[in-house]
Each structure stands twice: as C-alpha cells, then as structure tokens.
Amino acid sequence: YLVEALLRCHEKHSTYVMLHSKALHQMDAAVAAAQNFTKCDADTQALQQAWQLAVRAEERSAEVLIEAWAATVAGADSIAMVLQDEQLLSFFGDEQLLSFLGDWAKDVEVEVTCQNATVLALQSQALAASALDRTAWELMQEVVTFQALALYQQQQLKKKRLQHVALTDTWEALKTALLTAADPGQPLGQRLAAS
C-alpha cells in the first residue's frame, strides 16, 4: 500500500510538472503575440487566442497541482500510518537484521562468558539498532525525496494562492519510529536486542 501511494504521488507530480511546463510555453506564446500586437499589422484574434490558450493551460496546471497535492497528502498519511500505527520498522525480519550483524554474532558467542549480561544486552541492542538504521536507509531516502517533492508542491500552491490542506510531517514520523526502535525500553527495542 505504501509503495502504491508513493508511486501515485510521483506520477501526479510528474503530470503537474509537464502541464506546468506547457502552461509556461503557452504564456511565452501569448507574450510573443502581445509583442506582435504592438506592430502596425496587429492581429487581435491571434492575441486573444494565445491569451485564452495560456489561461486554460494555467488553469489545468493548477487543477493538476491540486490533484498532485492530494496524492502527496495521501502519501504522507500512508508513510505516517505504516510507521506509527502499523509499526513498519517492527516488520523488518530478524534475518534482515542478522544479515547486517555478520561475524559479530560469532564473536559474541565467544565473549558471552567474559561479559556482564547487562553489558552484552546493551551492546546487542545498540548493534541491532544500527543494523535497523542501515536496513531502513532506503525508506529514509524515499522520505527525504518525498519531503522535497512536497516542499516544491507547497511552494507552488502558495505562489498560485491555491488553498490546500496541511501535510503530515513524514520526517518526524520516521524519526520517532527510529528513536523508538533504538530505545531498549520500548517493545521494538527489546525485540531488536533479543535478535
């Protein structure tokens, strides 16, 4: 579900970018027609037609921007939901985490008798949290890209003075989820330490 929401967001944004580019091109054509209008052989019909095309292209661009923003809001809600409600990070399997631990697990077995169990548990939890960070790196990259796209759209909405709903802070949701995973007092942190 998350991947679909992000793909839909990127698709709508790409559509907006293309239509916005077309609107800018139409506006350039209208400006060129206005410059030609000041000459002696003025063609009012060509100027009016160029202006109408530019206005319609800009209106369509604004409509698609609102659609793109709606997809972005839905994507942000999806990201926040899977991180908070569905606890996406808790679904990273033990196999994924242990693949990052590599030879460390073998070294731990040798040192178990030499260390205090609390120290060993804390080291294990810290290593597992680090492995989770590396496992979640791709998700973090998606969130950063998503935030940049959302910021651009938000700037365009403000520039065009279009009303829009607020966006869920996906970066904060990811940060909270990672901090929770790194906390040995939280269930996910305890599970990581046990893995």
Image (cartoon, rainbow, N blue to C red):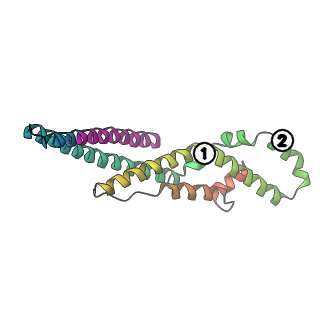
The amino acid beneath tag 1 is Trp
Position of residue 28 measured from the top left corner of the image (x, y, whole percent): 25, 41
Observer-nearest residue: 21 or 131?
A: 21
Circle 1: is it few (<14), some (14-19), or many (20+) Cα within 10 Å? few
Quote the CA–CA distance across marks 2 and 1. 25 Å
Observer-nearest residue: 68 or 47?
A: 47
Q: Secondary structure at mark 1?
A: helix
Judging by the rendered image, the residue that carries numbered circle 2 is: 106
Q: Secondary structure at mark 2?
A: helix
Position of residue 64 measured from the top left corner of the image (x, y, whole percent): 28, 44
Q: Are discs 2 and 1 less than 8 Å apart at CB?
A: no
Q: Which region of the structure is painted magenta?
A: 1-28
Q: Residue at x 21, y 40 (%)?
A: 32
Judging by the rendered image, the residue that carries numbered circle 1 is: 137
Task: Tell me the mark number nearer the camera, choosing from 2 and 1.
Answer: 1
Quarter of the image with the N terminus in it: top left
15 vs 78, left or right, is left
Circle 2: is it few (<14), some (14-19), or many (20+) Cα within 10 Å? few
Magenta span main SS: helix
The amino acid beneath tag 2 is Lys
